[in-house]
Amino acid sequence: MTLETRSRQTGTDLTFEKVWMMFQETDKKFQETDKKFQETDKKIAETSRLVKELSANVGGVNNSLGDMAEGLMASDLVETFEAIGLEFDRSFQNYKVKEKKTKRKLTEVDMLLVNGTIAMAVEVKTTMTQGDVDKHETRMDVLRHEPNSLFVNRTLYGAMAGVTMSKIAREYAMDKGFFVIELTGDTIKVDMPEGWTPRTW
């Protein structure tokens, strides 16, 4: 049996034209697939951009709420402490503590209240967590060991302030020796249960 006869019997008589058409069809499919991949990449890039924008907006909202909480606290906090026997004659908002020699920023205090013998470092959060308490405890250690004129020769206290906080977070802060300040509506309340003693640094 010749090659020509075998090709006719099996129906696989491949001419140059048929092979060329097959290549063209395959190339077309590759192009369509590549186009779909490009469209998918564009959608992924657009989704990523939207997620970044959303994250930035949420962060901005959180920052705005934090600033608002600090502003509300600042107006009445001195009077609130005065009502429980702690009088302060100076207050600072967003007080930056820098290394004396290098001027490198070591930490920042949301609110710092000072009188002749006492300094109170207040951390303000819209929602206070146990993690926030731990970070403020570390901050207090930095303040205590920094030879800044506002901390040297003064008893140093710490306070955690929040618009919302869980019972666990509140008790955790108090166990650490922090004053706990709650902002409810237009009222500021300092929790001081009977028998509780604040920690000094």
Image: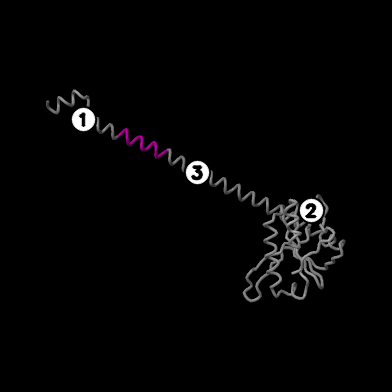
Q: Which amino acid does label 1 sit on?
A: Thr
Residue at screen point 69% across, 73% down: 146
Percent of width and height locating residue 105: 64, 68
Between residue 169 and residue 22, name the one nearer to us: 169
Element at badge 1?
A: loop
Tell me the quarter of the picture where residue 70 sits.
bottom right
Apparent side of residue 10 relative to residue 90 in the rendered image (left or right): left
Q: Which amino acid does label 2 sit on?
A: Leu
Within-10-Å neighbours for mark 3: few <14, some 14–19, many 20+: few
Q: Which mark is residue 183?
A: 2
Apparent side of residue 121 relative to residue 8 in the rendered image (left or right): right
Locate the C terminus by quadrant.
bottom right
Mark 1 → mark 3, Cα distance in angstroms: 44 Å
> Which range is magenta?
24-35
Q: Nearer the viewer, mark 2 or mark 1?
A: 2
**Residue under pointer 1:** 15
Percent of width and height locating residue 61: 67, 50
Q: Is residue 29 visible?
A: yes
Q: Which of marks 1 and 3 is nearer the N terminus?
A: 1
72 in relation to 35, above or below: below
| In magenta stretch: residue 26 | yes
**Residue under pointer 3:** 44
171 in relation to 30, above or below: below
Q: Which of marks 2 and 1 is nearer the N terminus?
A: 1
Percent of width and height locating residue 60: 65, 52
Mark 3 → mark 2, Cα distance in angstroms: 42 Å
Mark 2 → mark 1, Cα distance in angstroms: 86 Å
Q: Which of marks 3 and 2 is in front?
A: 2
Element at badge 2?
A: strand
